[in-house]
Image (cartoon, rainbow, N blue to C red):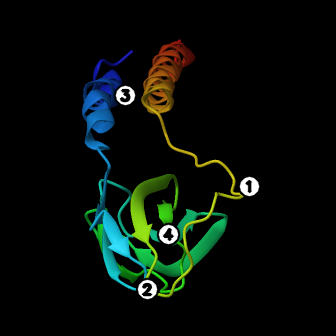
Amino acid sequence: MRKSALLGPLAATLLVAVLAPSVLAHGIVSVTVDPRTVTAGEEVTISVSGVEPDQDRVIVLIGQGIVVPFPTVRTDGGGSFTAKLTIPSRLPGGTYRFEAIGDETLTGDVDVMAAAGGIAAQAPAEQSVPESRTRGGLETAAMAALAVLVGLIGLAIVVRAERFRGHAGT
């Protein structure tokens, strides 16, 4: 068995094991809605960072039994986007949740005050909006552990193949 044949898979396995913690720490997601309180008809800015680069995000505003769709945005190469959105002027007052839906759903809250002559706040109606899915640390850690396991299995296959190849010539 040649030791040089083991170096590649061993190096790959070690690289995965060393980089897994930094990959887990890199995914710090930030969602900002500014201003946090707005009057219906005014504009807010939603900013997201720390997500997958070059991906589409569907933006919706949910609350008071209402779902307001906004145009889809695309994250830049760094995994960020900023969108200026106008709150509909006839929206009733209340607390609403922006959702940026992609691989996972990111949320940010905004308090909307009814515009003059607008609809007063109403009691929230039952919503049939599905639950948001977010990736937890445990899920990400399990994926990293699986990557390490696959690397170790690959290393074992190479070692075994080298042993058999060494015996084939005898």
Residue 67 left/right relative to 22: right
Q: Secondary structure at mark 4?
A: loop
Sequence order check: which comes first, mark 3 or mark 2?
3
For the point 62% across and 70% down, the residue is: 67
Q: Reply above or below: 119 against 80.
A: below
Q: Secondary structure at mark 1?
A: loop
Tell me the CA gap for discs 1 and 2.
26 Å
Question: Are there few (<14), some (14-19), or many (20+) residues within 10 Å of tag 4?
Answer: many
Q: Amino acid at mark 3?
A: Pro
Q: Nearer the viewer, mark 3 or mark 2?
A: 2
Residue 13 image-quadrant placement:
top left
Tell me the CA gap for discs 4 and 1.
17 Å
Q: Amino acid at mark 4?
A: Gly
Q: Nearer the viewer, residue 46 or 103?
A: 46
Sequence order check: which comes first, mark 3 or mark 1?
3
Q: Secondary structure at mark 3?
A: helix
For the point 41% across and 57% down, the residue is: 109
Question: Are there few (<14), some (14-19), or many (20+) residues within 10 Å of tag 2?
Answer: few
Tell me the CA gap for discs 3 and 2.
68 Å
What residue did someone put label 4 on? Answer: 93
- For residue 142, say whether it is visible: yes
Sequence order check: which comes first, mark 1 or mark 2?
2
For the point 27% across and 32% down, the residue is: 19
What residue did someone put label 1 on? Answer: 126
Label of residue 71 in the image: none
Q: Nearer the viewer, mark 4 or mark 3?
A: 4
Q: Nearer the viewer, mark 3 or mark 1?
A: 1
Q: Nearer the viewer, residue 76 or 12?
A: 76
Residue 119 image-quadrant placement:
bottom right
What residue did someone put label 3 on? Answer: 9
